[in-house]
Amino acid sequence: VREEPVSQALSRRTLLAKVIQGLGVTLALSQVIPRAQAEEGDVSRSEADRLIVLVARPLDAETPVQEFASYLTPNSRFFVRSHFGPPPAELLSELNWRLRVGGLVDRPLTFSLKELKQFQEVTLTAVVQCSGNGRASHRPKTPGVQWDRGAVGNARWTGIRLRDVLTKAGLQTTSRHVQFQGADRPVAVTVPLFVRSIPVEKALHPDTILAYQMNGRPLPLLHGAPVRVITPGWMADSCIKWLTDITVSRDEAQGYYMQTAYRYPTRPVMPGEAIAASDLKPVEAMIVKSLIAQPQDGASLVPGPVTVQGVAWTGEGKVVKVELSVDAGRTWEPARFIGEDQPYAWRQWQYIWQATGSGPRTILCRATDAQGDTQPESSSWNPSGFLWNGWDRISVTVKA
Amino acid sequence: MRIVRYAIVSSVILGLIGWAVMSVAQEEDLLATSAALAPRAEGLILARCSVCHSPDLIYQQRLPKDRWDATVKKMMQWGAEITNDEANLLIRYLSARYHPGARESVPPLDRDLGKVEPLRQEPPAEDLLTGVASRGEASYANNCQACHGTDATGGHGPKLAKNPILKHEDLFWDTVLHGRGPMPAWGSVLSHQDIADIYAWLSTR
């Protein structure tokens, strides 16, 4: 028989198309994350597959929440947010990379990585979270990467205090803001640079560091090699990657990424409403939030005890309570904290739920911090979809 | 005071309902609009928007027209090489296809590249054209640099300076015109003269 049955030929063609499609995606991905894989050895191809890619270029990828069953988020599974993507690795090599400190200082300074490491080394564990984490939950939808739940992670950061560097340079009395710039550059020169600043008080805080290690390994390229800023308790938009320039100034950084983007209304606003610039302030501290890591959304469970576990964190304070509800928020039961309790890190929690009967169930969770702030059912809408901290929720099915 | 608050709350709720509920006729109208505009709009997205970011960033948005308008205009300010007419076409297309009421996964477009309307049309040249390196530098910067790096030293895509493919001009043309692996086909974007110019410039690197 020479002629193939039509259906078989078709299905072969479909299969071939799928294979080619898959190949295209794999190729595209391996092109997107090449240097980190090849030179840092931190993101292997199979591990990168465990991130959920939202934008292939420049790479924006989030962590599947089941990874948050572990206290520390592994480097290879840590979410990646790129404005322009990593700079060429040559620029960041020991030979070429320099950190310049200038502006309102008595002594402008330049450091190699080796010189920077002469300052006292500190290590701290801190949550790093994208301001847009959870943006996909805002209604109406807001523009930007549609992050779901995983643009956050908890890592151990090792580096030196920014305060020590600034003290060595000598802050002048008019210093109010410390501006950061990284080595990453946009494709077109007409695109504004990613320049951000933090108030001098936060810059001089002993826990604000210039990190060169992440979870005990040299900072991977995708996470800002060789040095990034870590502002514990604050959103990741001040944690500048591939840091090359620190400029002390009297004013906030100018330009799009400080004056327009990453700003949040100081009063409740309606969709479509015009907001005066004076009613917008930079996104800074994180707010209280929690996630359910296990069981996974959509899981099928058998009746009986089910271990529900997850993480909770807040800004510069402390999480004091995590509660769960299986009746749409009418009643709440406290979860039990487990594991380590460190400032700026998240807390792990656990709750044993007695699953009974059969059918779909929704598990809700909410945290409260020491300031008394509790996660709301839904966060206030804001034009850029920042700071989502509505109750976390998963749907499961109980099957007898 | 209370009445005012109720009035505000109820008008917001009504507004949200109006925003979320869309009649079947409206939805069909939007589908027809986006289908008709798709060939040109998708060509622009591939050629102009993808220089800086992959199109997936666009496809995950669900925005009303005024926010699409603001976004496209911001991109023009930031250097997206589109004319005002092209911007208007994009805004019309994006707000018809990726509007707030659109489903999470919108129906797929016919992605056959052959159906993407060429941005420039000209008969294929009989012989390979003579390129002008100085012009090629500008065309390279506008179209290739995003992936292949400044001075063709590589980036997300391979380094092109001294790349062996430059020794095989026919293979170079084939790759640019029809794409290869993750690289899209540029046949509908670059003119033959552009390609010849880029080739000439790359040969000097």
Image: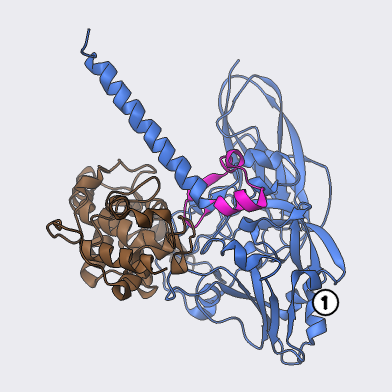
Chain colours: A blue, B brown
Residue A133 position within the rendered picture, expressed as x and y whole percent measured from the top left: 57, 54
User: Any magenta on residue A44?
Assistant: yes
Region of the chain picked out in magenta, as a range: A33-59
Residue B66 seen from this side: no
Q: How many discs appear?
A: 1
The extreme top residue here reads A1
User: For residue A102, what is the image quadrant?
Assistant: bottom right
Instruction: Write the residue at 59% across / 51% down.
Output: A390
Relative depth, front residue between B13 and A157: A157
User: For residue B167, what is the image quadrant?
Assistant: bottom left
Query: Is label 1 in a helix, a strand or a loop?
Result: helix
Residue B196 position within the rendered picture, expressed as x and y whole percent measured from the top left: 26, 64
Instruction: Write the residue at 44% across / 75% down.
Output: A189
Disc 1 marks a residue whose amino acid type is: Asp
Q: Check the image and report above or below for A330 versus A255.
A: above
- In the rendered image, which residue does mark 1 sit on? A164
The extreme front residue here reads B167
Q: Looking at the figure, which quarter contains the C terminus of chain A? A: top right
Q: Looking at the figure, which quarter contains the N terminus of chain A? A: top left
User: For residue A2, what is the image quadrant?
Assistant: top left
Q: Residues within 10 Å of mark 1 (few under 14, many from 20)?
A: some
Relative depth, front residue between A115 and B4: A115
Instruction: Write the residue at 66% across / 19% down.
Output: A303
Residue A267 seen from this side: yes
Residue A385 position within the rendered picture, expressed as x and y whole percent measured from the top left: 51, 60
Residue A224 position within the rendered picture, expressed as x and y whole percent measured from the top left: 65, 62
Relative depth, front residue between B179 and B46: B179
User: Any magenta on residue A118?
Assistant: no
Q: Check the image and report above or below for A110 versus A239.
A: below
